Image (cartoon, rainbow, N blue to C red):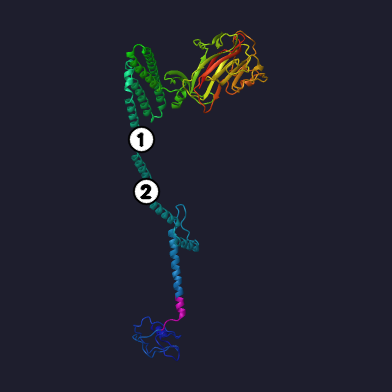
Amino acid sequence: MDKFINEVYYRSPPGQPRGPTQDIHGYELVDLDLKRNVQPLKAAETTTKDEWTPQVKYTGKDKRTFKKPEWPVVVLIVLLSLMLALLVIMLCLIIAVIAVIPAKDDSPGPDLSCNCTELIDSLIYQESFPNFTKWANDVSHKVNTDVRESLPNFTQWSNDVVHNIRETFPNFTHWAHDVVHKVNTNVTKTFPQWADNVVHNVRESFPNFTQQTNDVVHRVNTNVTLSIPKFTEIDSQILQTARTSAQDLASITSTLVTVTSTLTTVTDTLASLQDTSTSTAGVVDDILATTRETLTLLANLFPISCKQIFTQFPSSPSDYYTLASNNGSTYSAYCNMEELCGSGEGWTRLAYLDMSDSTVNCPSGFRLYHSGGVRACGRPATNGGSCASVQFPSNGIRYSQICGRVTGYKYNSPDAVINSNINGAYVDGVSITRGSLRNHVWTLIASRQNNLCPCSIYNSHSVPYFVGSHYFCESSNSGNSNQIEISNPFWDGQGCNYYVSPCCNVPGIPWFHRDYGNTTSTDYIELRVCGDEGTSNEDVPVGYYEIYV
């Protein structure tokens, strides 16, 4: 070993001194142990020609200065270090990829023979970019949370607003009840005391109308108020209440009518006592005036027309009602609450005759006809033209429309119309007018021949100018007879043959209708049965009519 060291470290090229740090090529080598004493070769040893014997001993205590290695060695060392670092990095990456990719239960283990380039690219991609989906979800969650926490509870806020509004406004129901109570109290208290004293003896025999009326109103209000929330039971309860209230009101109405009649009798009696003596005349006059005022007050409790009843109570049925007349009295009238003549509801009937009722008699001034069980009313026996008339007062009702119908029968040979004035017997049939001036309303014409009707195909007659188009006309070819013809009544729109077919196809028949628009009247209605010849030759008796305003 010593020999090797001497040869390596102490050999020098020929002609140069050998040094302990030079090799045979002249390069310096690092002394790995400078402190170690190197023993010189023994003098007795021999060498070859190439061997040399050191002349100076190296003790290891000499300090020597070494030169830095040349650049090829440095480059080699750096490259080897880089390769080693790359290998270590690749190994770490492979281990990391294997640890990151989970193995499925039904899949084999990781494929270690995968393409390292793809693994590295995958790793770089996963490590280089964050999970944007998770990041976006986190941001959205935080924004929603902040917004929800920053907004108020709108449901609670709206409830508070509604509550405050309700608390702010007063209780209108309670206020309305107080107003009604005060009004009723004041009205009751202000009823004339002198009227009670005057009719005290009369009223003793009758019930307390004020209390009875208040009880009815109270029962209606109570039933209606309690039944409003119970919508499933409201129909039957309201119907029952309405029936009961209607019966009560009918009873009250009947009683009031009786009172009115009694007061009228008192008035008549007092009027007959006015001339008994001078001392009692003044007292009788005062009592008479008071009684008349009481009658006026009672009349004001009733409606004046069926239209008024329908307007206030649209569900009122067609029936008889008590109405107040313009002279302070009351009367019973039939109200038709259905639509008539295509023009609204609430019609008041002024005229009515139904001779099929055996208890009904003809109006005054009319003659009774009777044939085959049919009864009718015509002109009294005359030798020339004439009219039988009946008037129907309006009782103060202001009307603008008239609606009605008439049924007549042929007797002998009526021959339609003649050109005469409205006050004469211008028609064989019925004339309907209104007022003392006899303003024309409608004319119903009868004819024994088809060509005599103005509306027939071969007409030979024309109507007077004041009739215009406001007429009906029907004919019969059954010949002359001394009894009424009941097989084909007039003005019912039926039984018309070809020649008079246009007469049965007019609008509205059998109902006639006049509408005067905004013009109103309180005139009475007049119905006349007329003929321009004697009754033995012709007549047109009527068996039914009804007229409404």
Q: Position of residue 293 (x, y in %)?
A: 37, 20
Between disc 2 and disc 1, the foreground one is: 1
Residue 465 position within the rendered picture, expressed as x and y whole percent measured from the top left: 61, 22
Pick the residue in front: 40 or 400.
Answer: 400
Residue at numbered disc 1: 172
Where's residue 502, x and y in %? Answer: 64, 21
Query: What is the span of residues highlighted in magenta in the rendered image?
Result: 67-77
Hey, which residue is sitting farthest front in the picture? 278
69 falls in the magenta region: yes
Seen at 33% across and 30% down, the residue is 182
Q: Quadrant of residue 213?
A: top left
Q: Quadrant of residue 511?
A: top right
Element marked by disc 2 = loop
- Among the two numbered marks 2 and 1 on one chain, the one whose residue lies closer to the N terminus: 2
Report which residue position mark 2 lands on. 152
* 405 left or right of 188 in image: right
- Give the image location of residue 496, x and y in percent: 63, 18
Q: CA distance from mark 2 to mark 1?
A: 33 Å
Residue pushed farthest right? 458
Disc 1 marks which amino acid? Phe
- Disc number placed over residue 98 in the picture, else none: none
SS category of the residue bearing label 1: helix
Residue 430 appearing in the image: yes
Neighbours of disc 1 within 10 Å: few (<14), some (14-19), many (20+): few
- For the residue carrying disc 2, how many other residues have a C-alpha within 10 Å: few (<14), some (14-19), or many (20+)? few
Q: Main secondary structure of the magenta part?
A: helix
For this view, does 418 lie left or right of residue 2?
right
Residue ranking furthest to the bottom: 15
Q: Amino acid at mark 2?
A: Pro
Q: Quadrant of residue 12?
A: bottom left
